[in-house]
């Protein structure tokens, strides 16, 4: 009988270790579009240290830059560490690794092996069902990240422009504080907002849906939902910013 995978609210982090540059951006963009929380580990030898911080994560390792001996040593370090018993591993490689697959197939390689590396469509066809089977998205519908750089936002209508800082963002909306603050009634007819995400300006339609008082401050946190007809260009900029936040939070010095 198969063991049922527990489903958390927040989901699991997904790491791609030393991914092929030719597919890295497109693959990460696609997974962010599917609301998965993904990041890249450029150096395979940092893998164990990162996984120890996130021991319930899923990782897909591109082993083509490693010899069989180095790859075996890396997988062995993961397999013997009791803290990492919940980590799910998959291997991506252009060449067969029959001995490695045979050695770890019954335990560590629960996400399988894929001989494809450059073919984005084939990678998606392999990875997406694996992520779904492991409930990597959790119970949430949308991936939301906290904005530690507090990017600027402007709310606009025919009478006023109100500025503020974004506290968190998802593909469907933001939560922000405003200066000076405004009541929900004063913001009811806001028609447009402009986000400044690392210098990328996104102008889109949206509306204030709710507000709540931030404990210990005199500020309100305003929840703004984007218009469902938001352009693909704006969505792409938002997804790129979300991916940057995830990567920067995990690797603050990079």
Image (cartoon, rainbow, N blue to C red):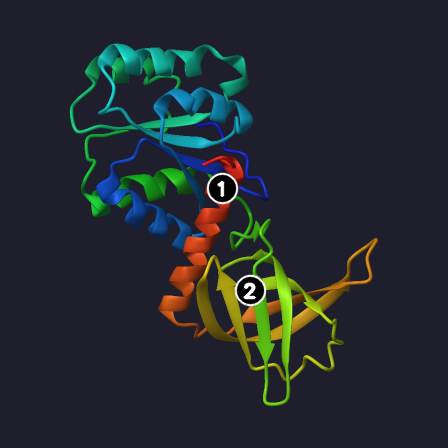
Secondary element type, mark 2: strand
Please rate how many residues cluster around mark 2, counting C-alpha atoms within 10 Å: few if below 14, some from 14 to 19, many from 20: many
Residue occupying image coordinates x 41% and y 43%: 132
Q: Quadrant of the C terminus?
A: top left
Q: Nearer the viewer, residue 121 or 106?
A: 121
Left or right placement of residue 10 versus residue 202 in this view: right
Q: Indicate the quadrant where residue 90 lies.
A: top left
The x, y position of residue 37, in whole percent, is 47, 44
Q: Nearer the viewer, residue 165 or 48?
A: 165
Q: Earlier in the sequence, mark 1 or mark 2?
A: 2
The x, y position of residue 248, in whole percent, is 49, 42
Q: Quadrant of the N terminus?
A: top left
Residue occupying image coordinates x 55% and y 39%: 7
Instruction: List the single residue furthest toward the left.
Output: 95
Q: Is residue 1 visible?
A: no
Q: Is residue 56 visible?
A: yes
Q: Which mark is residue 52?
A: none
Q: Indicate the quadrant where residue 232 lies.
A: bottom left
The x, y position of residue 109, in whole percent, is 35, 23
Q: Please, is residue 21 above or below residue 107 in the view?
A: below
Q: Which mark is residue 248?
A: 1
Q: Please, is residue 238 above or below residue 41 in the view?
A: below
Q: Please, is residue 75 above or below residue 110 in the view?
A: above
Left or right placement of residue 171 versus residue 187 in this view: left
Please rate how many residues cluster around mark 1, counting C-alpha atoms within 10 Å: few if below 14, some from 14 to 19, many from 20: some
Label 2 sits on residue: 173
Disc 1/disc 2 C-alpha distance (Å): 21 Å
Residue occupying image coordinates x 53% and y 13%: 82
Q: How many marks?
A: 2
Secondary element type, mark 1: helix
Mark 1 vs mark 2, foreground winner is 1
Left or right placement of residue 141 versus residue 88 in this view: right
């Amino acid at each position: 009988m198969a063991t049922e995978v527990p489903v958390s609210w927040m989901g699991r982090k997904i790491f791609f270790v030393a991914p092929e540059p030719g597919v890295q951006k497109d693959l990460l963009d696609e997974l962010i579009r599917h609301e998965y929380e993904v990041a890249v580990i450029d150096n395979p030898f940092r893998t164990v240290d990162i996984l120890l911080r996130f021991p319930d994560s899923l990782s897909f390792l591109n082993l083509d830059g490693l010899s069989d001996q180095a790859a075996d040593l890396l997988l062995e370090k993961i397999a013997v560490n009791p803290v990492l018993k919940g980590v799910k591993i998959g291997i991506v490689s252009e060449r067969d690794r029959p001995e490695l697959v045979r050695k770890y197939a019954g335990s560590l390689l629960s996400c399988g092996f894929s001989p494809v590396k450059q073919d984005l469509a084939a990678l998606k066809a392999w990875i997406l069902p694996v992520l779904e089977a492991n409930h990597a998205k959790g119970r949430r519908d949308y991936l939301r990240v906290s904005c530690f750089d507090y990017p600027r936002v402007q709310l606009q209508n025919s009478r006023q422009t109100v500025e503020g800082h974004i506290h968190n963002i998802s593909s469907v909306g933001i939560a922000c504080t405003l200066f000076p603050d405004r009541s929900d009634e004063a913001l009811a007819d806001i028609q447009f907002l402009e986000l400044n995400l690392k210098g990328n300006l996104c102008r889109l339609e949206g509306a204030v849906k709710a507000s709540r008082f931030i404990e210990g401050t005199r500020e309100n946190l305003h929840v703004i939902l984007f218009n469902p007809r938001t352009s693909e260009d704006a969505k792409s900029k938002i997804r790129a910013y979300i991916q940057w936040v995830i990567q920067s939070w995990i690797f603050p010095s990079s």
